[in-house]
Image (cartoon, grey):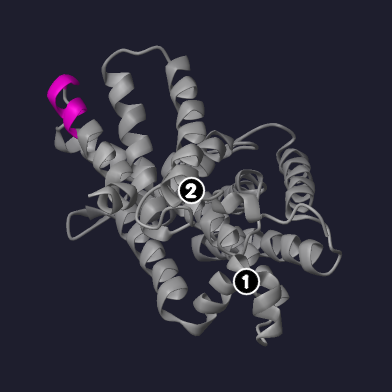
Amino acid sequence: MRGVLTRYGTALAGVVLFLAFAATAPVFLTMDNLALILKETAFLGILAIGFTLALVTAEIDLSVAEVASLAAVVTGALVHAGTAPWLAVAAGLAVGSVCGVANGVAVTVLKVPSLIATLGVAAIAKGLSFMLTQGVAFVGRWPSSFTGIARGTLAGVPNLVWLLGATSLAAWLLVKWTRTGAHLVATGEAEEAARLAGINTLGMKRLSLTLAGACAGLTAVLLASSLSSAAPAMANDHFLYAIAAVLLGMSMFEPGRPNIPGTLFAAFTLKVLGNGLVLLGAEYYWQDIVLGTIILVSVALSASGTGKAPFVKKLNFRR
């Protein structure tokens, strides 16, 4: 029973939270509201999955939100200028991936700790976002071929949900069912031992940070498509929630380790929490208070559940 609670206790608490809001919050169980929660989970979940992939190799990417904002600005600028939507989407994904590559090079070639390297890239991305927009958002009646990416449905299910599922499945299969995934995990668990075993640990770190950037780029495209606008710092509200989703996910399924199912379930739980508080009439600041509490408690649960320091303590802040 203790083992079950260690692995699934936090997830069960999320289920209880959902049921509590279902019983107390007006219109919580309506189809429109549940669809809204799932759509909001898609933005957060994809961004958090990228953060998770970086953390698998014991690196932390603090640039994901600013990179997503920059990618959204580039995407929005191209759509606003009448560029073909597919080219704008490709540009947004490319911007995120290039920023991820920059993070990887800074960490593995320049030997800058990921905490510092990603903060530097975040600052550059923020500056570029404001340079491109001059502080003014790109807004307009954009073509349905672009806005339909996030607003459309397939077989009655929102496209955002399909994209979240596809991204989550791809990330899970990569980590759990491929040799590359095994090398990513080995690099994060015991870098020196992995290197001595012949694993290209530096390459794995570059790959994980590049994938984190690519996920930020995908999030950016979906945000711009959904909102029909692009502005500097438009993804910043998702930053702390992404960190919270990853840390909360580390307290379930695979306690003490970053894992895709945990991140996905935690992202959904966080969006349920925010939605339920709004429907109950809670003041906006309670969401921030609860979010900070969740970050602290999730790390504590991760440590107590495994009997050792949480995975985040393995991060290399010194080179």
Name the residue rendered at 14%, 33% in the picture.
30
Kindly state the secondary structure of the residue where label 1 is placed: helix
Nearer to me, 175 or 316? 316
Residue 54 image position (x, y, % from top left):
59, 60
The CA distance from mark 1 to mark 2 is 19 Å
Closest to the observer, 228 or 63: 63
Q: Please provide percent x and percent y for residue 88.
A: 57, 59
Q: Nearer the viewer, residue 304 or 42?
A: 304
Q: Does 24 appear in magenta? A: yes
Tell me the residue that label 2 is attached to: 246
Question: Looking at the image, is mark 1 or mark 2 earlier in the sequence?
Answer: 1
Image quarter (top left, top right, bottom left or bottom right) of the C terminus:
bottom right
Q: Position of residue 6 (x, y in %)?
A: 33, 48
The image quarter in which residue 87 lies: bottom right
Q: Amino acid at mark 1?
A: Thr
Residue sitting at x 58%, y 65%: 211
At label 2, the amino acid type is Val
Label 1: how many residues lie within 10 Å, few (<14), some (14-19) or many (20+)? many
For residue 105, above or below residue 42: below
Where is residue 44 drawn, in percent x and y? 45, 45
Residue at 61 percent across and 62 percent down: it is 91
Say what secondary structure mark 2 lies in. helix
Q: In which quarter of the view is residue 270 placed?
A: top left
Outermost residue to the right: 110
Q: Residue tagged by mark 1?
A: 187
Numbered range of the magenta stretch: 19-26
**Is 199 placed above or below 143 here?**
below
Relative depth, front residue between 33 and 63: 63
Magenta-drawn stretch contains 35: no
| Residue 143 against residue 174 in the figure, above or below | above
